[in-house]
Amino acid sequence: MRVLVTGGAGFIGSHTCDRLVSLGHDVVVLDSLTAPVHRDRTPSYLTPGVDLFVGDVRNRDLLANLLRRVDAVYHFAAYQDYLTDFSTFTDVNVTSTALLYETIVAERLDLRRVVVASSQSAMGEGLYRCATHGEQTPDMRPEFALARSRWDIACRVCGGPLELQATPERIANPQNAYGMSKYAEELVAINLGRRYDIPTVALRYSIVQGPRQSVFNAYSGACRIFNLHYLLGGAPTLYEDGLAIRDYVNIHDVVDANLLVLTDDRAAGTVFNVGGGTAYTTEQFAEVVRRQYGSREPGRVSGEYRFGDTRHILSDIDAIKQLGWAPRRTPADSVAEYAEWLAGMEGLDEILAAADAKMRALGVVRKAAT
């Protein structure tokens, strides 16, 4: 096939392009190559042999020109950060997706598949269960509770403890601007795909890890932050009490999922979680990184927290496993490959300090009173 990959110079996009080209597909990339992710413009790892077009995915004429040439689309281009320019999330992530479908319908294009990148953040705090009052989807944690180091979420009825559940795709409860935009993107893609008979798949990625994850993005996750701290001879700060739960998925497993849904007709019209399948506390993940570098210093709990973070989230991946996909790599695999990619990079100490200063200046990193 001839495949368009928006955001094809990015982390997930470039790895997907590598695989597509290796399988003999012709690949067209549309990427704006903007900072902070692409501070130095065209990355050295851009897949050889792709046709690169530098431009905005919201450019109607450019998008239409590229769509006329292809059989399938991966829509990975997105705005992602921890900033308060809320309208930009919607403008980039939702408008571009609506324009994609608007163009396909207007041009009467016969595409074999559209795959849209969504996010675990569309599920917010996820699914919990109270032993007495059953399933609950909690609201976001209030600031007054976080400021008093009250990290865990209680039953809204009895105030008792809640047990985290693996969260399936039927749950949508986004609580930050990025998650809201990704859920809206899902709705646009799946519903317009169904209405106009455009075979569409939305993939809700958990925390994706591996090489090419930008070191310049202030909010690009624990793998970047923890690796940089240990590489530079320090130890990372673990927010809250270090016991927040996440699941991590390797970039190569993500690419496996991307390629699977490109051709498997059972996937069309469906949203799938793509996650690691195993719960890790922040403390446990920090230990994986510490062992990679042979450090003796564990991560430090300082009573700081990031405003807007979810407490726990674990994706239920049973649906995509029914198609034959399963995660095969571990967080240790991801960390080892990321560490190798970082080796030899210059100016990393400045990057880490600048990112931390930016997060604090924005009021994202805060200190609990007690």
Image: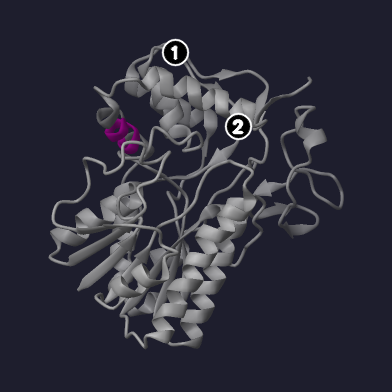
Find the distance from the CA under tag 1 to the CA under tag 2.
20 Å
- In percent of width and height, residue 250 lies at 35, 45
Q: Is residue 302 above or below residue 114?
A: above
Front of the two marks 1 and 2: 1
Judging depth in this view, the residue of 31 and 326 nearest the camera is 31
- In percent of width and height, residue 236 lies at 50, 20
Judging depth in this view, the residue of 317 and 197 nearest the camera is 197
Residue drawn at x 60%, y 32% is: 243
Left or right: 323 in relation to 52: right
- Which tag, 1 or 2, sits closer to the chain's start? 1
Judging depth in this view, the residue of 322 and 251 nearest the camera is 251
Give the residue type that dot 1 points to: Gly
Quarter of image, res 228 = top left
Q: Quadrant of the N terminus?
A: bottom left
Residue drawn at x 30%, y 73% is: 65
Q: Is residue 177 visible?
A: yes
Residue drawn at x 63%, y 40% is: 309
What's drawn in magenta, residue-wise? 333-338
Identify the residue under disc 2: 243
Q: Is residue 337 a member of the stretch shown in magenta?
A: yes
Q: Is residue 342 a member of the stretch shown in magenta?
A: no
Magenta-colored segment: predominant secondary structure? helix
Residue furthest to the right in view is: 158
